[in-house]
Amino acid sequence: MSFELVIAADWSAAATPTGRRPRKDAIWVCADRAGSRELRYFPTRAAALDWIGALLAEGQRTLLGFDFAMGFPPGFAAALTGEARALAVWDWLAVHVTDAADNANNRFELAQVINRRFPGTGPFWGRPAALDLPDLPATDRARAAHGMAERRQVEARARNAKPVWQLAYAGAVGSQTLLGMAALSRLRRAHPDLAVWPQETGFARPEARIVLAEIYPSLFDDNAQDHAIKDARQVMAASAALRAAPGEWWTAPAALPDAARIASEEGWILGVGPDGPLPVGRAPDDCFALPPGIDWTPVDAALATLREGTAPVTGVEVVPVERAAGRILAADAVARRANPPAANAAVDGWGFSHATLGPGPIPVAPGRAAAGQPHVDPVPPGRALRILTGAALPPGVDTVALQEDAVEAAGAVTLRAIPKPGANTRRAGEDLASGDVLLRQGAVLRPSDLALAIAGGLAALELRALLRVGVLSTGDEIVAPGGEGIADVNRPMLLAMLAGWGLAPVDLGRVRDDPAALAARLDAADVDALLTSGGASAGAEDHLSRLMRARGTVQHWRIAVKPGRPLMLGRWNGVPLFGLPGNPVAAFTCAALFARPALLRLAGADWSDPPRRRVPAGFAKRKKAGRREYLRARIRDGRAEIFASEGSGRVSGLSWAEGFVELPDAALEIAEGDAVDYIAFADLGIG
Ligand code: AMP
Ligand code: MG
């Protein structure tokens, strides 16, 4: 009976996108998987439905809750559709509602159309004063004799629930209901394995793979949730409560008189019983527990998750080639012309048609051909023309003799030896043909790549926009560089590493060990990815890991790597987050090995594993099984030396080192001279 995935959505009837920045009175969705929650804000209904569609496609047993009414008071469905079923109203609305990708919709006009089917004035009311809709009254008091009850049975039992007839003004739910039901009709048709509780199931425990139900987030205590925005707190609390939903939540309303009709025609709010809200279940305490298999993830498994789970997120822009160094190609670069564009001389000398040469000195033709100064007249057969390197071969020239091999006297040249046909010339297109794929999408452009693109006739390239990566330090003890205390080593170091990788670093500053402040700073960051350092372990002041488990999505947490076991990989508001350890050596190592390839992939580059070189060890060491180890190292006299201390707080070893020695997960005893793997910092893009 349990659900692997619980989704709680707070819907909105906004008529325009609500903006990039998360805000209140907009769409908030919380997806709660065993062990982690992901909270997302959406500026449009279409974007939210896309995400929900993707979650449903994961194939898990899912409970999906929306916070608008999924039915109307008695008599409405039959009056509108001829059938006394809520789902008939959904389908009617799916036909009549227009709701565009940018939120533009016809809800007020449609409410007026519906009102005209009822006697008197109403039942729908509430609209912007400026809208000229005579059959949609602006106020409650203007309604009369429409014949509909004000509330559904369930609304009389849920605290402060607003009637569905109200379309505008504070707390109104009517507009969301009209737009929401239309969307749900489509969702239902797209998922044959979806059942609507209780409209389709009655008041019984539903067994379908996807269960859709009406929820009322105001029923749930929101104080336990760390978020400044009430809608966000409520969907988080709602998803937790739904996960723990006791069995009676599904079945208790069956005791109502007329239960079958209510279920099918009016619908019901999950968590409300015949006498009002039902007790909230005790959530299995899974939100702070690790999902199975998360403990001590092997390095290769964590890297595989990143490799498979990350795709480019940045936009595309066209940039002049000369400003493209270090940037990432968003599309294959294709040659627009051949290189060289025309056949030309590879040396300074004498040009002629090989087949037409007679014996003895060759008479000289008038003029000369030089680079940029073409000789347009044909060179007559049996004659030689003075030609310089880079000059286009004039008509009648197919071969060039080296100047050093020729003697000119009395209007003729004598050659020491006749070169082979075609000698000392470059053919048109011998380097590149028009249409050749010069560089592949995902390539990080080097100076030599720019040369190639330009030779292929390209003046501008389609590049990925720069990936903005926010860097945040955490910890009460951390002070600005130069201050009294533990200096913030990590942030400037990480910002510089990001810049070296061709990304756009964004300094998010330092935050104290305070969960609300940390959450607020992360929420406010306008970035494509986040790097944090500190607070990633399981201690009392490790708020980053606590917050991520409560509000983010955690993919991996404890990774079997030394240094850096508490490395958190996950998402915050959907943005990939790398929760690096606080110790500078560990932060550096984890950033270089885990964050770098994933960030470059997000930025549009291909995934790349750094090359390893086998080198003899200049040290002896014994290693236990369990963790992969990265030792600060450098190569001297062809051998890998390692830094004397392995302490992950030793910044001195970082500056000393030029690479890592990588020791495998298994136990190992290394003697001097044994071959070990070495990864150069240069191959990790660290200069
Ligand atoms: P934490 O993971 O927050 O417990 O931090 C582990 C260790 O790293 C502690 O000794 C911190 O003082 C230190 N640390 C955390 N952040 C930084 C930073 N930005 N710069 C230097 N040291 C840090
Ligand atoms: Mg700390």
Image (cartoon, grey):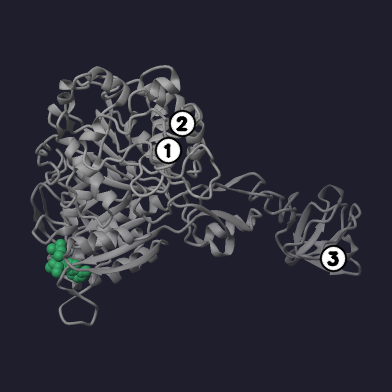
Which amino acid, mark 3?
Answer: Arg
Q: Where is residue 203 in the image (x, y as percent from the top left)?
A: 21, 21
Total labels drawn: 3
Which amino acid, mark 2?
Answer: Gly
Disc 3 element: strand
Q: In this view, does 44 lie above or below 452?
A: above
Tell whether 453 sits left or right of 345. Answer: left
Q: Is residue 184 above or below residue 606?
A: above
Residue 301 visible in the displayed image: no
> Where ligand 1 lies, by image quadrant?
bottom left
Residue 325 visible in the displayed image: yes
Q: Where is residue 284 in the image (x, y as percent from the top left)?
A: 10, 38
Please tell me which residue lies in front, 453 or 187.
187
Disc 1 target residue: 143
Task: Determine whether label 2 and label 1 are within 8 Å by CB.
Answer: yes
Please tell me which residue lies in front, 94 or 273.
273
N-terminal-most mark, 2 or 1:
2
Rounded to the nearest angstrom, the CA distance separating label 1 from label 3 is: 97 Å
Q: Which disc is residue 283 wearing?
A: none
Q: Where is residue 682 in the image (x, y as percent from the top left)?
A: 35, 62
Which residue is painted at 41% across and 25% down in the image? 89
Pointer 2 local density, CA inside 10 Å: few below 14, some 14–19, many at least 20: some
Closest to the camera, between mark 1 and mark 3, is 1
Task: Determine whether label 2 and label 3 are within 8 Å by CB.
Answer: no
N-terminal-most mark, 1 or 3:
1
Which residue is painted at 16% across and 23% down in the image? 251
Q: Quadrant of residue 651?
A: bottom left
Disc 2 target residue: 120
Closest to the camera, between mark 2 and mark 3, is 2
Q: Which disc is residue 368 wearing?
A: 3
